[in-house]
Image (tube, rainbow, N blue to C red):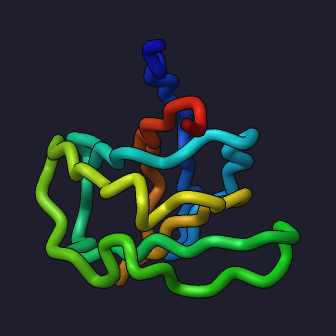
């Protein structure tokens, strides 16, 4: 059985923290950086069970960030995430793409 990929927007509005994204029971398998990155050089993936308290995950913490680049996430590292938020090291107004698939 195939697990189709769905793409979700993860938006930053003049902030270092993105809006939270409800994964809807799906598994995060990738993140794509936009072409319009300003001075941000690293990103961190945070997750939450209650959409209130976010903690750093072990999926790509503090990774170097490049323009228009797809970052693969090992599904085992993001399994069970309910809500995701990205954290940048500088304030941006941009949209990342989150790639998710139905949970196995």
Residue at 72% from the left image edge and 57% from the top image edge: 82
Q: Is residue 17 left or right of residue 83?
A: left
Q: Is residue 5 left or right of residue 69?
A: right
How far across and how far down the image is residue 2, in percent? 44, 14
Quarter placement of the C terminus: top right
Tag count in the figure? 0
Viewer-side residue, 14 vs 79: 79
Viewer-side residue, 8 vs 37: 8
Viewer-side residue, 90 vs 82: 82
Residue at 56% from the left image edge and 49% from the top image edge: 11
Q: Is 2 located above or below residue 29 in the figure?
A: above
Q: Is 18 located above or below residue 41 in the figure?
A: above
How far across and how far down the image is residue 8, in percent? 55, 33
Q: Is 78 located above or below residue 36 in the figure?
A: below
Q: Is residue 47 left or right of residue 51?
A: left
How far across and how far down the image is residue 52, in percent? 85, 76
Q: Is 94 located above or below residue 5 in the figure?
A: below
Residue at 55% from the left image edge and 75% from the top image edge: 46
Q: Residue furthest front?
A: 1
């Amino acid at each position: 059985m195939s697990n189709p990929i769905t793409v979700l927007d993860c938006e930053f509005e003049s902030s270092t923290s993105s809006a939270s994204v409800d994964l809807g029971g799906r598994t995060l398998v990738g993140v794509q950086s936009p072409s319009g990155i300003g001075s941000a050089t690293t990103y961190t993936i945070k997750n939450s069970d209650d959409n209130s308290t976010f903690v750093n995950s072990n999926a790509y913490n503090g990774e170097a960030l490049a323009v228009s680049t797809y970052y693969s996430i090992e599904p085992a590292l993001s399994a069970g995430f309910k809500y995701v938020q990205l954290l940048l090291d500088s304030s941006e107004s941009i949209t990342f793409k989150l790639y998710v698939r139905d949970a196995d």
